[in-house]
Amino acid sequence: MTERSAKAGIGASITGWGKCMPPSVLSNHDLEQLVDTTDEWITTRTGIKERRISHVEVSDLAKVASLHALAAAGRAPGDLDLIILATCTGDSIIPSTAAVLQAKLQAWNAAAFDLNAACSGFIYSLVVATNMIKAGTHRTVLVVGAEKLHYHLDFTDRSTCVLFGDGAGAVLVEATDQPIGVLASEIGMDGSAAEILWTPRDGTAGDRDFPRPTECGIRMDGPEVFRRAVTTMGDASVRVIKAAGLELEDVDLLIPHQANVRIIDATARRLGLDPGKVFINIASYGNTSAATIPVALAEAVEEGRVQPGDDIVFAAFGAGLSWGAAVLRWGDRVEPVSVSEAALPPPDRTTMEMLQPNIDFFGQGAGQRP
């Protein structure tokens, strides 16, 4: 359902932004050594040149991104009253990774929960944060998208292992009396098509026998995902722009989910947008699921692509099959209040050493799940 921001006098503005990308790089040329593929094949079909591989857990990525977002807003962890962590690759199921993040930030005044809508997770979370602020129950909400997708990758399957990477992005959303923030949004789901993009045997469904490698990892019907993503992202974007009372030409910047450059190009054409109004960073990071939009937003602000009062469109599509779109009006500030020095510890293994458990498990089917 498409909805317009409802409660007059209460808005929810993004006041801080940040990201955390692991330092270890896995290039297309590296993948040529692992699977039957080439740099040319990957680049022409996806637009991806490299992706990041994390040596730490999702909560660690989320912590660094969050500290940068808090600093940009001039806030401290104690100012938070809610943390929403969008992820499908959390540290654990019990407790939630948001709980772990709350402890690592020492944000003791904040409630916290995970939200899993896969690649649409950040938009879902931003909509939830906005509506909770508008309802008056919360005023300062940290929204994080963070993933460690390489854990689930089968490096014998070139249709999936070339696509995904690790990373985190975060924004701080605060109550305001200005007419800014999310102007209109849409979130949706088609569970009847869930098995065209899924990770079998990662939950309680089935028996307790140790799963075979073919029953694990990300599995995808690429052509069907592509077809649905092109249609859904473009159509949802058009609907939220209309619901916000805007015309297509009013859009200042499109920040789409970074899944495939051809999907991004098709969405931009559906909106009639000049390429200069579309933010793309997929070449450097690949698909980081719930992290792609907040990471791209942080980079867009850093690069001067976001100006005060801009109308920005977010659009995403992911497993479930989920989708989301939102129109956000930016506030007056595009410079951070302060800058955090938070950073990950250096990796103690090479990129290939970090991938070895996956290679052993999926390639040989021996041992325990990495």
Image: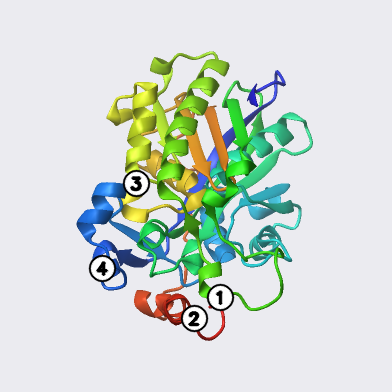
Q: Which residue is mark 2?
A: 365
- Above or below, 152 against 353 in this view is above
Q: Residues under labels 2 and 1: Cα distance?
A: 7 Å
- Tell me the mark number nearer the camera, choosing from 2 and 3: 2
Label 2 element class: loop
Give the Cα distance between marks 4 and 2. Answer: 21 Å
Callout 2 touching callout 1 (CB < 8 Å): yes
Q: Amino acid at mark 1?
A: Arg
Marked residue nearer the N-terminal end (2 or 3): 3
Determine contact: label 1, label 3, CB under 8 Å.
no
Task: Name the image colouring.
Answer: rainbow
Which badge, 4 or 1, comes first in the chain's sequence? 4
- Nearer-N-terminus badge (4/2): 4
The residue closer to the viewer here, 215 or 162, is 215
Pointer 1 or 3: first along the chain:
1
Q: Are marks 4 and 2 in contact (CB under 8 Å)?
A: no
The amino acid sitting under disc 4 is: Glu
Residue for badge 1: 212
